[in-house]
Amino acid sequence: MRKLGLFAIAALFAFTACNSSAEKSESTTEDTLSKAAAPELVEKEISITINAGDDMMYDLTEIKVKEGQTVKLTLNHTGKLPKESMGHNWTLLAQGTIVSDFAAKAMLAKDSDYIPAGATEVIVHTKLIGGGQSDTIEFSAPAKGLYEFICTFPGHVGMMKGTFYVE
Ligand SMILES: [Cu+2]
């Protein structure tokens, strides 16, 4: 009788243990599922619109994207002034670029719309545009990290700059 009682207790333990491990494995499966599903929630493409007018300001100073995303970025010049006097571009700079040094160099590159030919500091850039114009570029988000973007038109970098986060 005593043996049977122990057996019953042991069986109960076994059942409880089994049951709780089943619950555990279930929740683990759920965790795995939600983790597995997460990458699909990251859109493959992200569209960003940034506006800048005759006030020499971007309407966005922070842009966040995810690593590997295709970034479709549109720059709109919402002003009226021509590109010769109030040109804007959106230029994404490589990490480690000393922005003021690069801007000083870019200022001199008038013939190539203020993007020095073959500049290794530039990851990607839009065209230089004037009032009423737009330009759209498409590129792959670079490696995770923090980048800076600027307008390379002479004198604009002080007002026209922002941070591009790749998460
Ligand atoms: Cu500008």
Image (cartoon, rainbow, N blue to C red):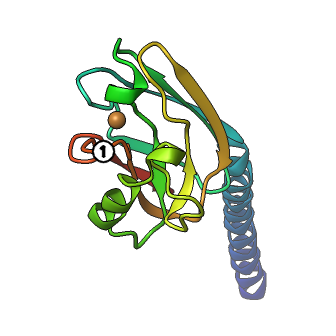
Q: Which residue is mark 1?
A: 154
Q: Is 166 positioned to the left or the right of 55 in the image? A: right
Above or below, 143 relative to 75: below
- The N terminus sits in image quarter: bottom right
Q: Is 20 positioned to the left or the right of 79 in the image? A: right
Quadrant hosting ligand 1: top left
Quarter occupied by residue 104: bottom left
Residue at (60, 63) in percent of width and height: 118
In the rendered image, the residue lying farthest to the front is: 111
Inspect this view and state whether residue 43 appears.
no
Question: Camera-side residue: 94 or 1?
Answer: 94
Residue at (58, 51) in percent of width and height: 124
- Residue 131 coordinates in the image, percent (x, y): 41, 16
Above or below, 113 relative to 81: below
- Residue 164 coordinates in the image, percent (x, y): 43, 51
Above or below, 132 relative to 159: above
- Residue 57 coordinates in the image, percent (x, y): 27, 31
Question: Camera-side residue: 41 or 6?
Answer: 41
Q: Is 35 positioned to the left or the right of 133 in the image? A: right
Inspect this view and state whether residue 153 appears.
yes
Above or below, 89 relative to 14: above
Residue type highlighted by circle 1: Pro
- Residue 4 coordinates in the image, percent (x, y): 78, 81
Residue at (39, 69) in percent of width and height: 97
Residue at (55, 68) in percent of width and height: 120
Task: Determine crowd level at label 1: few under 14, some 14-19, many 20+ residues with C-alpha closer than 10 A.
Answer: many
Dot 1 falls on a residue whose secondary structure is: loop
